[in-house]
Image (cartoon, rainbow, N blue to C red):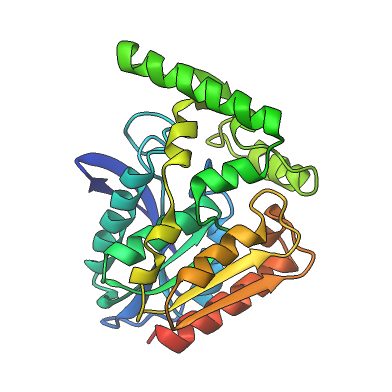
């Protein structure tokens, strides 16, 4: 069962969904998991599939849209990485006050840029008892640099500088095609395009301030603070959008208990469809069942 809900983060009303396992009994409490989408994703893109699998494993699950995305209120289409952290913490609070959820047993799952977000949340909020991050990056600046040719990198920095100066005098950021900021990878771009084409909330244009905000967010700086709580990282061995080396940097700096799984030959968007999706969720469910049992 899915129930649409709303809650507040920093005074802004956010839209979300709570998914209930079919075998939930009256008066019973389960562990809860908050799912966090990525760079330009929305809660109805990919995450319902994750929720379904976690429900089948017995977990209460919540998805939501960050400020300014989907039906959530707030400045439209901002990346706002630290604001997203606050949104995840608010989502955890809201999930924890549901009568069907044990507030002392909360986990978080993030995919793509959502991986970076949940690492930051887990490092700062000890309510997080178990964390899973999939195809994520450890250092925003290094990641953006790694997927560009030198000329493209110089052009990006110049574009960002001009927009930064414009914002400070006008209060407005310019707009650019999504693909100018988040370079598409030929290998799995078709999968992403097909999924986004069926979702009206999946936008194709972004504020240029995304560049600055990405360049300044580095979860590998804080990932060691998650320990001794468990962290699972899953990378695509042939990910050409967020190279697995960037996920490796998170793993190398994390404390125990930790685990990293690299799926051979898997691209970035392939983790959202079988058979790679099934492998991701097999590892995810096993990790949660070991460190955060549903019952």
Quarter of the image with the N terminus in it? bottom left
- Residue 76 in view in this figure: yes
Q: Residue at x 47, y 85 (%)?
A: 289
Quarter of the image with the C terminus in it? bottom left
Looking at the image, the residue that sits furthest to the top is 170
Q: Residue at x 31, y 11 (%)?
A: 169
Depth order, front residue of 43/111: 111
In the rendered view, would you say 249 is above or below 179?
Answer: below
**Number of numbered discs on residues:** 0
**Percent position (x, y) of residue 126?**
26, 71
**Percent position (x, y) of residue 238?**
76, 59
Looking at the image, the residue that sits furthest to the left is 11
- Residue 42 in view in this figure: no
Depth order, front residue of 161/208: 161
Depth order, front residue of 77/295: 77
Depth order, front residue of 41/183: 183
**Percent position (x, y) of residue 160?**
49, 24
* Residue 293 appears left or right of 234: left
Image quadrant assignment for residue 167: top left
In the rendered view, would you say 39 is above or below 54?
Answer: above
**Percent position (x, y) of residue 96?**
25, 68
In the rendered view, would you say 129 is above or below 13?
Answer: below
* Residue 262 appears left or right of 174: right
Q: Residue at x 32, y 32 (%)?
A: 74
């Amino acid at each position: 069962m899915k129930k649409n809900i709303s809650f507040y983060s920093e005074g802004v009303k956010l839209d979300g969904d709570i998914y209930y396992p079919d075998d939930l009994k009256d008066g019973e409490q389960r562990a809860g998991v908050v799912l966090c989408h990525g760079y330009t994703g929305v809660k109805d893109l990919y995450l319902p599939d994750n929720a379904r699998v976690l429900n089948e494993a017995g977990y209460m699950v919540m998805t939501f849209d960050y400020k300014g995305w989907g039906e959530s209120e707030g400045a439209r289409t901002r990346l706002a990485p630290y604001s997203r952290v606050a949104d995840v913490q608010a989502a955890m609070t809201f999930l924890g006050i549901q009568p069907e959820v044990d507030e002392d047993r909360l986990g978080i799952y993030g995919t793509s840029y959502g991986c970076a977000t949940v690492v930051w949340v887990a490092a700062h909020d000890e309510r997080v008892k178990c964390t899973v991050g999939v195809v994520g990056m450890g250092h925003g600046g290094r990641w953006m640099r790694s997927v560009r040719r030198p000329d493209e990198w110089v052009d990006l920095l110049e574009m960002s500088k001009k927009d930064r100066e414009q914002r400070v005098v006008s209060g407005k950021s310019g707009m650019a095609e999504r693909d100018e900021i988040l370079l598409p990878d030929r290998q799995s771009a078709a999968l992403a395009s097909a999924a986004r084409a069926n979702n009206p909330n999946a936008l194709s244009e972004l504020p240029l301030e995304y560049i600055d905000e990405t360049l300044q967010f580095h979860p590998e700086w804080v990932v060691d603070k998650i320990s001794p709580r468990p962290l699972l990282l899953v990378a695509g061995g042939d990910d050409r959008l967020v190279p697995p080396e960037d996920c490796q940097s998170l793993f190398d700096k994390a404390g125990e208990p930790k685990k990293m799984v690299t799926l051979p030959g898997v691209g970035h968007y392939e983790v959202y469809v079988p058979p790679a999706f099934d492998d991701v969720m097999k590892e995810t469910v096993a990790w949660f069942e070991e460190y955060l049992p549903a019952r």
